[in-house]
Amino acid sequence: MNLGFVGLGIMGSAMAMNLIKAGFKVTVWNRTEEKAGPLVEAGAVAASTPRAAAEASDIVFAMMATPFAVKSVRDGKDGIIAGLDSGKGYVDMSTIDAGTSKESARLSHEKGALFLEAPVAGSRKPAEDATLTIMAAGDSDLYQRSLPALEKMGSKILFLGETGNATRMKLANNLVMGGMLTALCEGLALASESGLDPLQLLEVLDSGAMTNPMFRLKGGMIAGSGGFPAAFPLKHMQKDLRLSLQLAEEVGQPLFATATVNELFKKALSEGLGDSDFAAVSKAIRK
Ligand code: NAP
């Protein structure tokens, strides 16, 4: 099976590398061409446009930053849709809104192709280790055909039904993550300002019902005085909070805490922290 991969950022480059290592023939494209270099060295073929990546593939995957980025590689004469035809599949793994995803499904179907949305949970390391959680929804035939590739990128894979369901599930997941991370940052800031050792707070949290891998992974970084190299860029966390609030508007669900957390992340963005890891939101919290 020939695969395409469009969008070689933190996640896409690691995921495409796992497809190459698994022996698939992979054609890649990225806006910033240099990022394709290591993948080409590992055996991938570089395409000149997203359309060319789709034309060379049975199934083309995309892992884009935002809904705008999805549309930028999807639409127009050089876009993915232009390279689709009957029998091909388009799998969008970006975290976006259900509306954009449904539009991708409609455009794929108009070309006689199949569509699957498949956003992921898990960051840089799970992407490298192929232990992502993949939430898929859309055309079940394409899900079945994509499984051999999805299994090389993730260790837990769920099929959630019609297009839009996986997108919504991913947003509900990330809303929880943003809130938990914010609570951790505030707890550590309060401990420090109260003259306590923040590392001891991490120890207390880790020994009770609130223990979790994210606190272990990010706690030391937040309590320490080092930098915040991005595994999950803060700008993408704010995008996910914004999209969660947009979904909440659509379904009439109040999200009291998430609305406040979003304001905090907007403040962090305005302080120039967008390309840092989302744990850098602690800088916007500390006095
Ligand atoms: P990233 O490192 O910022 O990469 C984003 C990708 O989108 C890059 O390939 C970038 O191209 C491309 N892009 C952005 N704007 C574009 C445009 N206008 N036209 C064409 N290409 C454009 O992001 P990431 O961390 O890999 O995340 C990708 C997606 O996965 C996001 O939706 C994110 O929310 C989601 N996600 C991330 C994580 C994580 O921990 N990082 C975890 C789960 C889900 P350039 O290289 O040219 O900038």
Image (cartoon, rainbow, N blue to C red):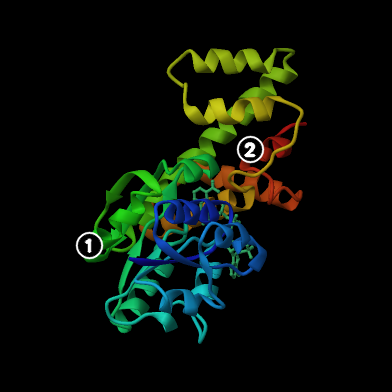
Give the residue at x 47% y 59%: 94
For disc 2, the marked residue is: 279
Q: Position of residue 18 (x, y in %)?
A: 45, 51
Q: Is residue 227 above or below residue 67?
A: above
- Quadrant of residue 278 within the rendered picture: top right
Task: Please state which of residues 153 and 242 is positioned toward the viewer in this rendering.
Answer: 153
Q: Is residue 40 above or below residue 274?
A: below
Q: Position of residue 86 (x, y in %)?
A: 28, 81
Q: Position of residue 174 (x, y in %)?
A: 47, 45
Asked if residue 31 lies left or right of residue 174, the reply is right
Pointer 2 with pointer 1, Cβ within 8 A: no
Asked if residue 72 lies left or right of residue 244, the reply is right
For disc 1, the marked residue is: 140
Task: Please state which of residues 124 and 105 is positioned toward the viewer in this rendering.
Answer: 124
Question: Quarter of the image containing the C terminus?
Answer: top right
Disc 1 is placed on an element classified as helix
Is residue 135 visible in the rendered structure shown here? yes
Give the Cα distance between marks 2 and 1. Answer: 36 Å
Is residue 242 visible in the rendered structure shown here? no
- Quadrant of residue 279 within the rendered picture: top right
Q: Mark 1 or mark 2, which is nearer the start of the sequence? A: 1
Q: Amino acid at mark 1?
A: Ser
Ligand 1 visible in quadrant: bottom right
Query: Alpha-carbon neighbours of circle 2 within 10 Å: few (<14), some, or many (≥20)?
Result: many
Task: Please state which of residues 236 and 196 is positioned toward the viewer in this rendering.
Answer: 236
Give the residue at x 63% y 29%: 186
Give the residue at x 64% y 68%: 33
Question: Quarter of the image containing the N terminus?
Answer: bottom left
Q: Nearer the viewer, mark 2 or mark 1?
A: 1
Q: Amino acid at mark 2?
A: Ala
Disc 2 is placed on an element classified as helix
